[in-house]
Amino acid sequence: MNFTVGEYKKRLDNVKKSMQNKGIDLLISHDTANMYYLTGYDAWSFYYAQCVLVHVGLDQPLCFVRAQDSVGAYIKTYLKNENIIVYNENYIHKWPNHPYDYLVEIIKQKKWDKLSIGLEMDSHYFTAFCYEKIKQGLPNARIKDSNRLVNWVRLIKTNAEINYMKSAAKITENAMHTAMKVINKGVRQCDAVGEIQKSLFHGTKEVGGEYSSITTLLPTGAGTAASHLTATQDKFKNGESTIIEISGCVKRYHAPLARTVQLGKPEQKKIDAMNATIEALNAGISVTKPGNTANDVAQEFWKVLDKYKIKKESRTGYSIGIGYPPDWGEHTLNIYKGDMTELKPNITFHMIAVMQFGDWGVEASESIRVTEKGNELLGNFPKELYIK
């Protein structure tokens, strides 16, 4: 196990308290990161139906998994064997049969079919079919959206979680150094990413890496004006910039980082935009401390952009921690104007400053921990435009 049984119990207790506050008797959590958070279950099985059930009266969750993956649940989780619920292959791609048909039967057998049931309505992999099976199969239940209940419990990290994120940050740094080394004129983007990925998996002498929840993002040239582009077999060209956004991963915990590299002499507008980006990023970081809000950070950030007349519509940060494809964000706190979430010690977020100008852009980011008196950057890598 990656955490003590005591830590899992505290997590469960916090979730059950939140359930009671929201009037939820039974929570069905389909979010892969939440399943891991509550039970320790960790496998590439999230492409098909699986979930964790939390009942306010039980001392452990129930883990609902496919038979083919059940051994993984016995190995990875801290749960008693009887709390691992297994469905067989008769439910795999045998429409209209679906694994949630069996889940509904389990809920009925336990006489939970008239309870108030919370669902993660906007969770990745929780399909419309999953919802319809529950809705049709449990007509007497009071079904409601749990509103990312577990995600919000995850917001404040324990020191054990922070330590995993710090290890991930060191891997991120190593991989970013690799990126700056291998991105050169005439090199194929895919070849550079091969080296970056190798570094992410190689990790450090102390800790090995894992697959990240987001692949290496590598917008290049005109692509720097777009977000989330990935490598192609095209070659890097002199005069172009490339944005690298990556994260190391340790025990499913992430610490993302973004930087911009320029091949050849940059235009002055790129230097100016990068300087403004860094100034805005530093301004937001400067007010990151307990008692302030996400809105306070955003206001300081956008003050700098307003000074330089730079328009930015997208948010500039979000809570991070556990991640599974397709995202390393926690879907809770946003660094954006109007988000009044209070910053507390051991909240962690990715503050990402991407500036896009039609056919070019620059970017820098930091993974940040709120400390008792201020903040701490999890990584240590220069923010400036890296010129080769």
Image (cartoon, rainbow, N blue to C red):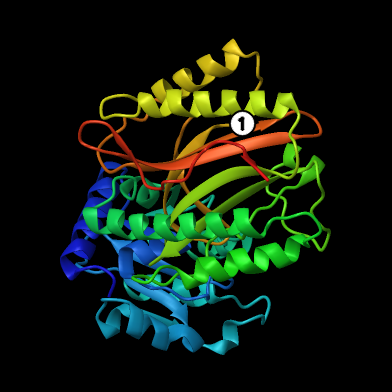
Would you place residue 201 above or below residue 91 in this image? Answer: above
Q: Position of residue 189 (x, y in %)?
A: 75, 60
Give the farthest residue toward the top: 307
Q: Residue at x 73, y 41 (%)?
A: 224
Say what amino acid the circle numbered 1 marks: Ser
Q: Residue at x 53, y 76 (%)?
A: 45
Front-lying residue, 376 or 317: 376
Residue 334 seen in the current view: yes
User: Which quadrant, please, contains the N terminus?
Assistant: bottom left
Would you place residue 192 above or below residue 238 in this image? Answer: below
Front-lying residue, 15 or 224: 224
Q: Position of residue 326 (x, y in %)?
A: 58, 58
| Picture mark count | 1
Would residue 249 appear left or right of 114 to someone viewing this image?
right
Would residue 62 appear left or right of 310 to someone viewing this image?
left
Q: Position of residue 256 (x, y in %)?
A: 49, 50
Would you place residue 267 above or below residue 350 in this image? Answer: above
Quarter holding residue 385: top right
Residue 29 seen in the current view: no
Query: Residue tagged by mark 1?
Result: 314
Q: Secondary structure at mark 1?
A: loop
Q: Position of residue 195 (x, y in %)?
A: 62, 67
